[in-house]
Amino acid sequence: MTVELGHFAIILAFVMAIGMAVIGLFGRMRLFAGTVRTLPFLVAGQFVLTALAFAMLMLAFAEDDFSVLYVSQHSNSLLPFAYKLSAVWGGHEGSFLLWVLIMAVWMLAVTLRSRHLPPLFRQHVIGVMALMNTGFLAFLIFTSNPFTRAVPFVPSEGVDLNPLLQDFGLIVHPPMLYVGYVGFSVAFSFAIAALLSGRLDAAWARWSRPWTNVAWAFLTVGIALGSWWAYYELGWGGWWFWDPVENASFMPWIVGTALIHSLAATEKRGIFKSWTLLLAIAAFSLSLLGAFIVRSGVLTSVHAFAVDPERGTFILIFLVLVVGGSLTLYGIRAWQLGSRSAFSVLSRDAFILGNNILLVVSLAVVLLGTLAPLGYEAVTGDKLSVGKPYFNLFFVPLMLLLSLLLVFAPLVNWKRTDTSRIIQGLRWPFLLGGIVGLSMVFTFFDTLSWSRVAAWFAVIIAVLVTTGHVMDLVRRVKGGHTPSLAYAGMFIAHLGFAMSMVGVALTEELSSEKDLAMRPGDTVERSGRQIRFVSIEDVKGPNYTARAGHFVVTEDGREYVLWPEKRQYVSGGNLMTEAAIEWGFLRDLYISLGEPLGEPAGSEGWAVRVHIKPFVRWIWFGSIFMGLGGGLAVLDRRYRRVRERESRELLAGSMPAS
Amino acid sequence: MNPVRKRRLVLVTTLLAGSALVIGLVLLGLRENINMFYLPSQVNNGEAPHERSIRAGGMVLEGSWQRDAMLSTFVLTDRQGAEFTVRYEGILPDLFREGQGVIVEGTLGNDGVFGAREVLAKHDENYMPPELAGMHLERPG
């Protein structure tokens, strides 16, 4: 009965979502008089019901209830318990239930922490979020129901969770990513509520800033986790493939990054008002586009969800309605916004504008590159693929320019900055950057290529950014200012960006990768490391058997053992490659087993791939710092103070003057 | 024209020109960096360009796979008479088998041999790359 209870709960939640959307958006009409008061209860109810549904599905997984179609397709009695639970979101239907649950959590959080907002505005925010969730729940119930029973033929054993997903990565990556994706619906709803209520001053920017930051932080960490997971689990050492599904998560991130910066400018200076609104709409729309790309199967991707045209059509219609509706509203209302404010070229305003322009151009690059195969096939019927060369061609210079702007971030003030202050502030960073750059010249340019030069610049700019920020911090502390948490967040996030950039540049340029034919007993040397292939052993796991290579590596007088595996899962399916990685702050050594070379005849031994990946960890550490910084900024006392003041003003019956 | 209108006009014109420039450049970059996809018949009748990065696909012909240490050669066929030879150095994907549909990325040499940088055989046993779906392959056996 458990899944029926879940099914029933989710239908009830759907009805409540409809109710909330109607009350939230039309609550002022006499017809609905008095209903507005019920909104918080409906939000709480929807959360409880969705959580109940989720728990019921999890219970079905825990109990190996293979009469539930979704469970039988994504689990197996031999599956380790932790993976049984995470298998709840290992497939399309369950992962969308997680999506809906996260939406309910966001709605609850917004409702609980928005009591200081003007009632009409708050009501609209909840209404818009409920409207979105109505769409999501309809999608879940009508096209992707995880609670369907497999009757009358109940399988006695489940198909199994895709072995690639039987991993810690599946436990953490999708939830983090979805919190980010869905979190942009808050910024979206604030923007729509601002347009609806006509409150187009800077107030909505102040209110939505912390929410946007949190969503962005989660998305950042979620993407980084996905990249790390692909790196160690897919077995071949890549950390980013420009795969359509990766791009689908990257596009909202790019716009989200632009948004958190322009929100700052709108809040502090009242500029870029209509632009910020547009970005808030775009960030969420791109999250939806991502969902469409992932779940419709229109693009070839390694992230295989079951392909179902009906689902694709549903999301596409939803996407068109959301984008069309919000842009129409934007078109009607936003033109009234005249933000007239002069700022000089050397001002924080101008640099945020630069940041936004570069990010939007980056978005255009990713968007066109991702959708080009689709468009081309629709027009000509021929197939094409867009790969790394295209994305690198544009992304490398764009990110270098973006990071160059970052050098100025701690130096420029709002409105205008004295040239002398900037020159003074840049003196030391440039000196240090110059020294680092020059000292690298002789060792770094053993080969000369554009990408090598770009990587060189990336390292130098990272030094400039780091020195500039650290010096600014020192200056502030010396001047007797205790840096605020908002400043600390900015500081950590910017340094995280520089760190990721160094990681990308050095990994891409200095990695060495070699496929070797090795027999047990063979030793090879890779950049000063001795790698000895000792033997091949048979290993038995909980639900798989494997052939594991025993490798002993000698590096700088230290010896360590690596065990890359080839796994065959009991439930059938493909052979899986499990890489063995000796990780380090400065380099990873990465060994994966290919195939035995006995087939076809002509050779013996094993194919072995050895990677040496310098600084690859920096990519993910840097991203985690970015996420932490974004989260830290939200904890700033300023937001609490503002909330308290606005509550008081609200109670006193006067709207906050803005 | 009043100053507000003029400002707006300048802004809109700049925006439009900027967007046009960006999109133009991106499309140009796309044109230079895409991999077109070709079937064995198109490789045979000369539709596929030589010495340029492309993708091609087909079924690995039974008995055609040979290997010398890390260097593999095999034949891709559409089972309707068209076929071409692929040379690849490195580790093949786990699902590479004779009789499987695969996609190769690389360049077609002037000798008609496809030098593959990458061999893709994704997902699972039942997976057919969508690119090959149009080939109406008869599965062996």
Image (tube, coloured by chain):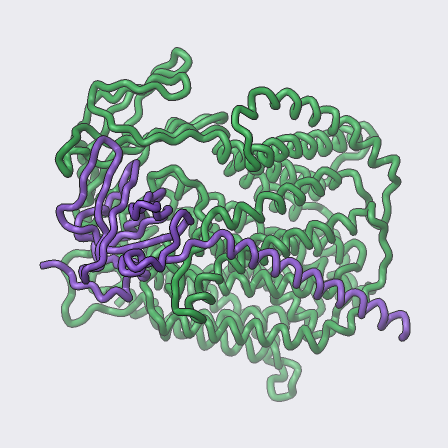
Chain colours: A green, B purple
| Residue A3 quadrant | bottom left
Question: From the viewer's perspective, is A524 left or right of A99?
Answer: left
Q: Position of residue A59 (x, y in %)?
A: 30, 57
Tell me what residue is drawn at x 32 percent, y 61 percent. Answer: B131
Q: Position of residue A643 (x, y in %)?
A: 72, 56
Q: Nearer the viewer, residue A7 or A645?
A: A7
Q: Nearer the viewer, residue A384 or A11?
A: A384
| Residue A470 quadrant | top right
Q: Quadrant of the C terminus of chain A?
A: bottom right
Outermost residue toward the top?
Answer: A557
Q: Is residue A443 above or below residue A267?
A: above
Q: Position of residue A50 (x, y in %)?
A: 42, 65
Tell me what residue is drawn at x 21 percent, y 32 percent. Answer: B68
Outermost residue toward the bottom?
Answer: A31
Question: From the viewer's perspective, is A460 left or right of A428?
Answer: left
Q: Nearer the viewer, residue A2 or A527?
A: A527
Q: Quadrant of the N terminus of chain A?
A: bottom left
